[in-house]
Image (tube, rainbow, N blue to C red):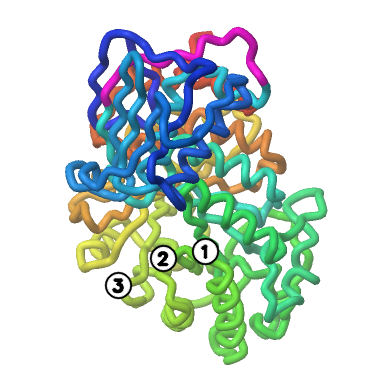
Amino acid sequence: MTLALIPRPLAVHELPGTFRLTAESAIAAPGLTGDALRVAEYLAASLRVPTGLPLPVGEDGDVLVALDPSVGEAAGGDEAYALTIATETVTLRAATAQGLFRGVQTLRQLLPAAVEDGALVAAADWTVPCVEIADRPRFGYRSAMLDVARHFFPVPDVKRLIDALAAYKFNHLHLHLSDDQGWRIEIPSRPELTAKASGFQVGEGAGGFYTQADYAELVSYAADRFITVVPEVDVPGHTNAALLAYPELGLKDYQPRQYRGTDVGFSTLDPDNEATYTFLADVFGDLAAMTPGPYLHLGGDEVDVLDQEAFGRFLRRAAEIAAATGKTVIGWEEIVASGVPAEVVAQYWGRNHGRQTVEHGVSDDEFRDAVAKGASAIVSPASHSYLDMQYGPDSPFGLDWSGYVPVRQAYEWDPVGYLGEVEAERVLGLEAALWTETVATMTEAEYLIFPRLPGHAEVGWSSVHRDWADYRTRLAAHAERWEAQGRNYFRAPEVWAA
């Protein structure tokens, strides 16, 4: 049989027989404390509702969750795990709680799809095939991005996305928190940002923002699933909303206004105004204080109204201010032409593949050269990993400036190979990005996210080998899981026969 596991584990050895969860089953977590114990309790809690089984967590049981330092030593990395399912027992071992959590996702995928249901499922057969799995990720940075600026998504929607990311072993969530249309995060030292610049979005709708408590709730919810939140405040461009709150920070003749469109490149902070850099210090400082993760994203893309000298000068100083918060700074690919330090992580998005309307872009050769000279890269080519690209001409949502991105194209690519002749260790990983010009609800967003998101999970986690026929079979089986979760998805003809 084909085990419908996504991402595909490093090593799988199928065994005869099955293991069955029963009313006598229990989760054994001997000696576990802290995060590791929390993973065992998460496993039990996630199974109790659909199965109706008590599944106590204690010292003894037929499902063993155990810390084992040798797993990390043998497989490498904090996310490595080993899962053995025999007819009478399940054993999940990892060197860290994070590794245990990744293994839990594999175990859940081996159970019937009804395990994803939010209600009791009557008369289900809670069996899993016997198997031995040894697994670890290829890349340490596996991310998805949600643009909450063009359309605002409330906390429950973001949590719903976090759950999907956790199920497919992503470990970062990038939130695009500001743009021309709206400012979405409360900044205590700059209250006018949310008071004056959060109440609108693309098209109709009232917009919105995350309070400090909202943001802390999202960061905590993600951390419980071993996902790191990466906040982005995009500067110097994409700042019309910020300028609504602080118009004195714009260029002399710029008139900020409520903006519900989708054009880019027309707004900027003034690089020659010292107040601009005081503003950045306030915003980056507050955002860093609210963010326990190691990263801060400063944007740095799509500015038509600054020349290269001013653009580069701004980004160098902005990167210095952001880095002074103690965070590792990420910026879009344009930063590699701005003379920022190599410690800044460059995020490739491939604007030269279709979008030709903005200044200060870099060629693929320039980006590869920057990586060769020591920069680290996150790879997000729009032609493969932008979830807002349409599947094809009949897609009701999405854009097509980088061409159509069908499911197979989203799967058949490699972050290192895409960049070409670069050292593999300079590539931190990948990101699947969802810009939200055309989607206003999570139901609409999920149409673009599924079924492409699992392919990016596999690109980030599994080996470089791609077998479309095998992957398509595994992916098709996940539709039943999404339906049990009540998720929307595009039933792509290339995956599911008409």
Who is closer to the viewer here, 361 or 187? 187
Identity of the residue drawn at 69% across and 58% down? 214
Label 1 sits on residue: 302
Is residue 327 shown above or below 24? Answer: below
Label 3 sits on residue: 342
Mark 1: few/some/many CA within 10 Å (<14, 14-19, 20+): many
Q: Quadrant of residue 84?
A: top left
Residue 410 shows in the view: no
Horizontal side of 362 relative to 133 (left or right) equals right
Who is closer to the viewer here, 429 or 204? 429
Label 2 sits on residue: 334
Element under label 2? helix
Give the residue type at disc 1. Glu
Horizontal side of 261 relative to 359 (left or right) equals right
Residue 259: x %, y % from top left:
75, 61
Q: Quadrant of residue 324?
A: bottom left
Element under label 1? loop
Identity of the residue drawn at 29% across and 46% down? 95
Give how far apart the Cα atoms at labels 1 and 2 are. Answer: 8 Å
Give the residue type at disc 3. Ala
* Residue 131 colored in magenta in the image: yes
Give the residue type at disc 2. Glu
In the picture, the quarter occupied by the N terminus is top left
Identity of the residue drawn at 38% across and 24% down? 5
The reply to whether callout 1 and callout 2 are in contact (CB within 8 Å) is yes
Query: In the orientation shown, which residue stands out farthest toward the front?
Result: 59
Label located before the other in sequence (1 or 3): 1
Element under label 3? loop
Q: Which residues are magenta?
A: 120-132
